[in-house]
Amino acid sequence: MSRRPAVDTVRRAVRSTRAWARSVAPGALPDFLVVGAQRCGTTSLHQYLAEHPQVRAAAGKEIQFFSIHYGRGERWYRGHFPAPMAGRLSFEASPYYLFHPRAAERAAATLPYGRYIALLRDPVERAYSHYLQTRSSGVEPLNFAEAIAAEHDRLAWALRAGPDSRAAHTVLRRYSYTARGRYAEQLERWFRHVPRQQVMVVRSEDFYADPASTYAELLEFLDLEPFLPPRFAQHTRRVERGGPPAEVARALRDYFVPYNARLAELLGWRDPWPASGGSD
């Protein structure tokens, strides 16, 4: 098994302990969130935003308050953020928020004036990237085709006790390969609770191809001054090589056609990821 999960667990435990200590005099609630999606460039975006001189990041990426740790309360959450400062915005990035069934409602109640950023990647490529990450962590024994076939039953089993059970958090995060790529249903849930003008949705491929332009648009959305990080570089824990098996990829592209069409209609986009695998 990879050492990464164990290292991450220790790191999160230390961060949580420090947050409890700081909750005696907690910081301000964040002004904006990067809500997802997983494996869509959120680590790079988090880094770029944190480098802006008017922005202060939380104590770490993936606080997961509105998804996993909501029961710890607002003071614990605020313990991850610096004290308020005029002219400065704070934020955090937790890619599970877009997918978690209750995160949107909780975020809207806690941050009614907050702004939210979602990155969306080709769902086939995202699914395979997700699979590779889970596989590298040593918790996925199946090959990609088998994992896709097993996904429905895995998620249904985990959700028997509700989306906030320990089993649900574990399985939804590990094995939601295709479910996380059905972006429209996730965004529709967010739009039920958050005014659409407070949500910016970016196609990951556009972000990868022209990070400077995408970053400038995000700064405008956040009412931040223009700024360029020292350099745009991909920030990721694992370099991906190759794509999904061709036969599985073709089946998944066909599977996602109606979901991508629903997303295009929702956002007023052209077909963002045509079944042929091209882009507009």
Image (tube, rainbow, N blue to C red):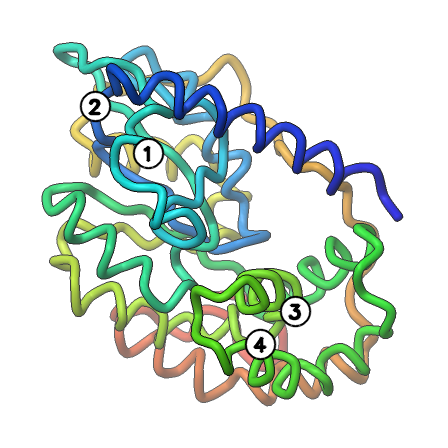
Residue 182 horizontal side relative to residue 107, left or right: right
Q: Secondary structure at mark 1?
A: helix
Real-space CA distance between mark 2 and mark 1, rounded to the nearest whole angstrom? 9 Å
From the image, tell me which residue sits under label 2: 28
Of marks 4 and 3, the one in the foreground: 4
Q: What residue do we see at 62% from left, 28% from top?
A: 11
**Mark 2 or 1, nearer chain start:** 2
**Mark 4 or 2, nearer chain start:** 2
Q: Amino acid at mark 4?
A: Ala
Label disc, if present, on residue 77 of the rendered structure? 1
**Mark 1 or 3, nearer chain start:** 1
From the image, tell me which residue sits under label 3: 175
Q: Where in the figure is residue 265, as x and y percent of width and height?
A: 28, 78
Q: Where in the figure is residue 161, as x and y percent of width and height?
A: 48, 77
Task: Confirm or deny contact between disc 4 and disc 3 (CB under 8 A).
Answer: no
Tell me, yes or no, if residue 278 can be seen here. Answer: no
From the image, tell me which residue sits under label 4: 158
Q: Where in the figure is residue 73, as x and y percent of width and height?
A: 29, 41
